[in-house]
Amino acid sequence: MVRTFHQILLWPLQLLPLREDSQIHHHWELLEKDAGGVWKEVDDEFCADPDAFRERHYREFVTFLPYVQRLLYGEGAKRRSMAAYGESPIKVYRRLDVATARISFPERNAPVVFDVRHVDLYFFYDVDLVILVVEVSGSDVPLDVVQDSLHRFGRAYPSGWTEQGDGINCPRKVEWLAADGRVLAVSDYEARKQYLESVCRERAPPLAAHWQYLLNPMAAHHTDQAGALRFRQLEYYRMPLMAYLAVEHPERLTRGDFARLAYATAPGDREALPFSDEYLARFEQNHCYDKYYDEARSGSRLSTRVMCCDHAFLIVGDAARPVFTDAERGVLGQFRHQFFLLGLIAHMHKGALLMMSDRLVQTVTRLNIDQQETVRRFRVEIRSLLEIFLRFTHRYWFHDVSDHVQTREVFHGLVKELGTDRLYLDIREELKDMGAYLDSDLLRRQSNIFLRLTIVTMIGLIGTTTTGFLGMSSLIAATDHHLGMKAIYVAVTAAAFALLTLYTLAKSQRIAGFLDALTNERLPLRTKVDSLLDIWRQKR
């Protein structure tokens, strides 16, 4: 039996730009305008009222390094009044109309009711990204029901349908209920025709009705739903999750139980493994953080296991230990605050990088080298992305969030499983390649311009020297000559100067060598004279 259960879903979504001529967009302003009062800004998620500031707020704050503190909480009141960047770059909006979630799972007769603790949207300044955060909780929940919730609840749409018409790996039904019991929204995983038509027509699946209800007034980019705030899907339709399980008699959990929890798979035979022995050979080394867990000493203080994979982060511990279940000073408080923020930062990093990767793909897709306008727009968009990446790197990107050993190691584990370091390097290399291409293209165009100017200068030099010689020379008095003789003088002079110019160009490489030797103060006079004579010497 799981005495206390918390599940947090974090789903990053890409927000489409509001204006083509701007890099920084305040999407939350449209949310306030179009939501009709459903979404309310959380003025200070951390807590601005000194009378309400508790020890858990203090513990949360001091966990992080100073630059992470400034990202999450902004500056203090005095500092905020002096600096334009005093406020946190994170904007949080919350809706309070959803009180409970009633979920019906396949092969279970009775639905399960969870309390909805939070439904939040996290916006990030200068990053076209929003993260939907939904936290549900329950008490005295059987382990197999928890496994079903981890496996099925966070599904944005079905991957297919069973013979009975249920969405594969999805709940049979999800209902959002208000505090008075009213049904606010119901899932539609069984609407097979609707999903098929959308993918066939729009090349994009619709969100299940209950998830779209939570996101209103935001709308998917491909739908006909009214609203200026549009989003695109970035990740897999299975929403990443974090979970806390205070388990009765954790020593009874089998290796198969831990594997199913870590990978958030469906319930099954507790004595059997969900995957092959070979696949799970290094399960503990790769996915378990066992600093505070020792199977041989079950029932002791070493009964807390942290597990992580690319789509799930879980903490499992003993429900009988007050330090594990304490929401103020214990592990439950850490999970809902410190560990949640670790997950938020890690998924923000990955979502922002995926957003930039998507925009790179769109930019290259719109490029048509036969149309000058698309080439010009490509250069502008690549420069814009380079600037966005630079600002993201300096404002949001960091490898360490804390010097607290457990917090630091857990964050490194999250980053490793999400692959954000590799993704960051890939995006940086792609942008560097794009920048190098733009620079080389600029140099090529400049060299073409210089070549044209050189040709024009050469032709003009002949004409200028010819007219200058004839106009200033006192050797030839051709004023009284007839026009034909004047033309002969001009032609002969122009031909002479043309031959001299061409001869100079032919010897230009040797002349350049002589000039280089002449300006080198370390060379003796004899060497400089030899360099001058080399202009006319026959090369062997």
Image (cartoon, rainbow, N blue to C red):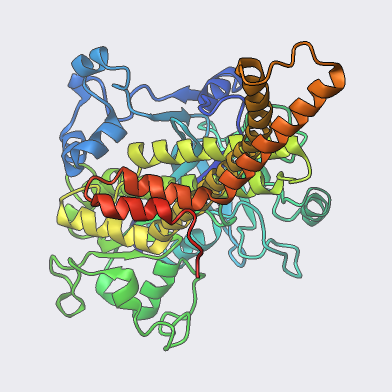
Q: Which of 458 and 61 is in front in this view?
A: 458
Q: In this view, does 395 lie above or below 35?
A: below
Q: Where is residue 492 in the image (x, y as percent from the top left)?
A: 74, 33
Q: Where is residue 20 in the image (x, y as percent from the top left)?
A: 64, 27
Residue 6 appearing in the image: no
Q: Position of residue 194 (x, y in %)?
A: 80, 50
Q: Where is residue 524 in the image (x, y as percent from the top left)?
A: 23, 52
In-image side of 106 versus 88 (left or right): right
Q: Nearer the viewer, residue 486 or 323?
A: 486
Task: Give the residue drawn at x 75%, y 26%.
Answer: 490
Q: Is residue 466 above or below residue 193?
A: above
Task: Give the residue drawn at x 56%, y 49%.
Answer: 437
Residue 346 appearing in the image: yes
Q: Quadrant of residue 374?
A: top right
Q: Quadrant of residue 60?
A: top left
How many tags in the picture?
0
Task: Give the residue drawn at x 71%, y 45%.
Answer: 367
Q: Which of 339 and 432 is in front in this view?
A: 432
Q: In which quarter of the image is the N terminus?
A: bottom left
